[in-house]
Amino acid sequence: MAENHEVERTYRDLGLEAVSSEPVSTEGTRSFAQQMLGFWVTFKTMFKKVNTVEYPDVKEPTAPRFHGRHQLNRHPDGLEKCIGCELCAWACPADAIYVEGESNTEENRMSPGERYGKVYQINYLRCIFCGLCIEACPTRALTMTNEYELADDSRSKLIYEKADLLAPLRDGMLMPPHPMYPDMTDENYYKGDVLGFHPSQEVQQ
Amino acid sequence: MTTAEILSFDPGWLILVKGLLVFIICVVATLVAIWAERRIVARMQMRIGPNRVGPFGLLQSLSDGVKLALKEDLIPAAADKVVFLIAPIISATTCFMAFAVIPMTGPVTLFGHKTAMQLTDIPVGVLYVLAIASVGVYGIILAGWSSGSTYPLLGGLRSSAQVISYEVAMGLSLVAVFIYSGSMSTSEIVAAQQKWWYSVVLFPSFVIYAISMVGETNRAPFDLAEAEGELVGGFHTEYSSLKFALFFLAEYVNIVAVSALATTLFLGGYHALPGLTFTENWLGGWFTIVWFLAKVSAFFFLFVWLRGTLPRLRYDQFMKFGWKVLIPASLFWILIVATMRVMSLRGTSRAGVLGFAVGVVLIVLVGSFLYDASKKRGESESEIEIPAPSFPVPAIPVKDRSVSQSEVTRG
């Protein structure tokens, strides 16, 4: 510890407060017997419970917010949430998303508001599952599921089309195209005022 | 009747049958060994290991072998084709040949003939094993050289240097066994261990052999030759398909062979554990092979345990350990053993021999104590005053300073 005092003295000489420092301590070489303890560690480990998950047979649930395959969501009446704005494609650092928007017409309405995503592709050979697209999406149309079994054997199979990504129709949903809920605007849709389809929407179809 | 005499009555066809049996035992042992190693190492790392092909994954190594055989066989353009083909064959065949002199059972009856599960019993059996192992090195060095590529060449050089170095220590550790048993024939060495195993009587030899056999087989922690991070794959980098499989087979047969030799020379061969000698007569003497295999598997477990526990040595440390520790220790030990042997043969009293042994032990202890003390004194003397720094610096650890200072004085 001699040099420790030395350092403190130096600090004093310089008129500085002694900085509270601990000398670097390197543990010396262990004794032979202590080194041999490693053998006991490996031997003991043989009888411990293994960490392996026997995957194809046993599938453990993922963490709830695991980044899996994407999904394009729908409004409760079945209209698509995607408005074809391409923000997800712009946000994507791996350039994995391709979107082509199209205007909604009265005869062909896929989503509330002006536009919808006509072509929507995600290339899972490029996707890094960072989730920036989900952050970018202004309408919560794009979210990620917990599905992780995405392996496949060809490029074309791994470029998911809009049909592969769209959420299924649930109860109270109608397959678009169909008109918007009567007396509702896209803002109402956005705020969640639409809770299901209206009979008038069905008749029109 | 000694084993050599029993074996001398073997008809030719029986020798062929036994040769085939030895071959089958080696190949099956390899398949089981690869599976067992992967399972055990996996357990040591809290994994399961191969468990999908066959019951408990037992057929994993077989399916791996089939896969290897069906793979494309590449020969690099720069390779020396003839030597490239011969090298794996040398490697594999020599490993099998070493098994010819290993006694696996006591006297047994095979197809109505009284014989022993040992292909042949030559008077210099152990030397034959060492010689065959040395020829096996050619497989490694020729493979490295003929690949016509840098990494295999380096790996081959490393491997052969390693194997040759550790063969010296291995050979020396066996000398004490020869001196004590008065024979180089494997069956007679086994017979000489009826009372006491040589692993007890010649414990230092046993330790040196156990260390050098790991070095000899290029296994972890001495697997510098195939150090994946440094040399890609060592001498067999350019090999593929069946030729690679041959090297793989050779490695494992080699492990089984050195384990079998260790069993023969130090663990009483096919004899039962002390106190269980009555089991040797079970199944008409065939039960002895169970003891033999049990001892060999114990050695194999040691190999796996070492691999699961120790990190790989640095090349210079490894060579230093072989040449500066194992070989001198071996030589010193042989000197003591030889002296004791001569003393007892000349009729010196038990007390005299014992006194000599105790004296040597005392001298070694005192010597090592003095050496340690002088080393400590040297350390304290080398401590010097470093000039007080003119600016504030954090404390320097004591140990590093003395090291750097001793380096300065040496340089």
Image (cartoon, rainbow, N blue to C red):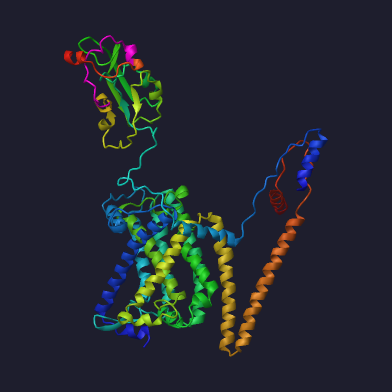
Q: Residue at x 56, y 57 (%)?
A: B317
User: Residue B118: image x %, image y %?
Assistant: 34, 77
- The magenta span reads A167-189
Tally of numbered discs: 0
Quadrant where the C terminus of chain A lies?
top left
Q: Residue at x 47, y 63 (%)?
A: B214
Q: Main secondary structure of the magenta part?
A: loop
Q: Can residue A188 be found in the magenta stretch?
A: yes
Depth check: B262 or A31 in front? A31
Is residue B283 shown left or right of residue B169?
A: left
Quarter location, residue A70: top left
Q: Can residue B115 be found in the magenta stretch?
A: no
User: Residue B258: image x %, image y %?
Assistant: 42, 68
Q: Residue at x 56, y 66 (%)?
A: B326
Visible residue check, residue A92: no
Against B193, is A112 above or below? above
Visible residue check, residue A200: yes
User: Residue B389: image x %, image y %?
Assistant: 77, 39
Q: Residue at x 31, y 69 (%)?
A: B25
Depth check: B377 or B73 in front? B377
User: Residue A59: image x %, image y %?
Assistant: 33, 43
Quarter location, residue A48: bottom left
Is residue B69 shown left or right of residue B44?
A: left
